[in-house]
Amino acid sequence: MNIDFSKNTDGLIPAIIQDSETKTVLMLGFMNAEAYQKTVDTKKVTFYSRTKQRLWTKGEESGNFLNLIDIKNDCDNDTLLIQVKPEGPTCHKGTDTCWNGENKGKYGFISDLEDTIQLRRENADSEKSYVASLFKLGMNKIAQKVGEEAIEVVIEAKDENDDLFLGESADLLFHYLILLQAKGFKLDDVVEVLKSRQKKN
């Protein structure tokens, strides 16, 4: 890997640390050539601490190591994207990230939809909100709706109308997300089950 440590007079380049699984950006540190090499050799992310004026392996005191998964160099060869598997919180203040964020899996629009469902459940008027009305009707009604939508998906899968198939698939996913929350779960819980199965296989 061709890394240009000479661009800055202090020989340091920024290293962006990202969870390899959740893709959450955890922190930003700086590396010199020696820190980079130690990171590669030990598989534990090591920075050059400008405060301590020495190499500093993240977790050397706290035990919250950043286990190296992959390193990518940017187009100018002067910034690293380092993917890691963190052990414990990354920030010295005890938070998952140095921006006080949670290191949780995000699924783009689907995660936003989960948040909306939760808000409707907690705050919306059941006479005005479809989601709130389903929660008011209870588990049996929600489970029934999932069953109905699943049947519709099967029916449309046997047909040639892709628009109807995708529409029914969207309805099924939407109602399934509602069912998950009615049972006290989120999509993350299902993903964890799938991950555990992958490891066994």
Image (cartoon, helix red, strand yellow):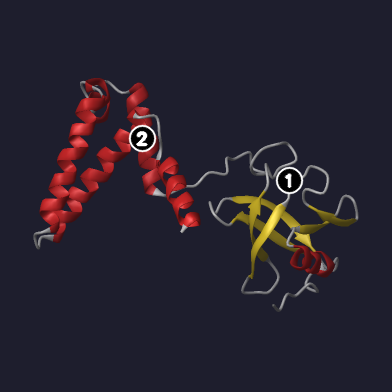
- Mark closest to the chain's N terminus, 2 or 1: 1
Q: CA distance from mark 2 to mark 1?
A: 34 Å
Q: Position of residue 111 (x, y in %)?
A: 41, 43
Where disc 2 sits, the SS reads helix
Farthest-out residue, bottom? 2
Q: Position of residue 71 (x, y in %)?
A: 65, 67
22 relative to 112 in the view: left or right: right
Q: Residues within 10 Å of mark 2 (few under 14, many from 20)?
A: few
The part of the image, by quadrant, that contains residue 89 is top right
Residue type highlighted by circle 1: Asn
Q: Which mark is residue 116?
A: 2
Residue that appears at 85% across and 54% down = 50
In the rendered view, tell whether residue 25 sits above or below residue 7. above
Residue 12 seen anywhere in this rendered image of the structure: no
As rendered, which of 87 and 30 lies closer to the eye?
87
Residue that appears at 37% across and 46% down = 110
Residue that appears at 12% across and 54% down = 156
In the rendered view, tell whether residue 43 sits above or below residue 130. below
Residue 26 seen anywhere in this rendered image of the structure: yes
Q: Nearer the viewer, mark 2 or mark 1?
A: 1
- Quarter occupied by the N terminus: bottom right
Q: Residues within 10 Å of mark 1 (few under 14, many from 20)?
A: some
Where disc 1 sits, the SS reads loop
Residue that appears at 78% across and 67% down = 41
Farthest-out residue, front? 200
Q: CB atoms at circles 2 and 1 under 8 Å apart?
A: no
72 relative to 196 in the view: left or right: right
Q: Position of residue 38 (x, y in %)?
A: 81, 65
Residue type highlighted by circle 2: Thr
> Which residue in the protein does label 1 denote?
64
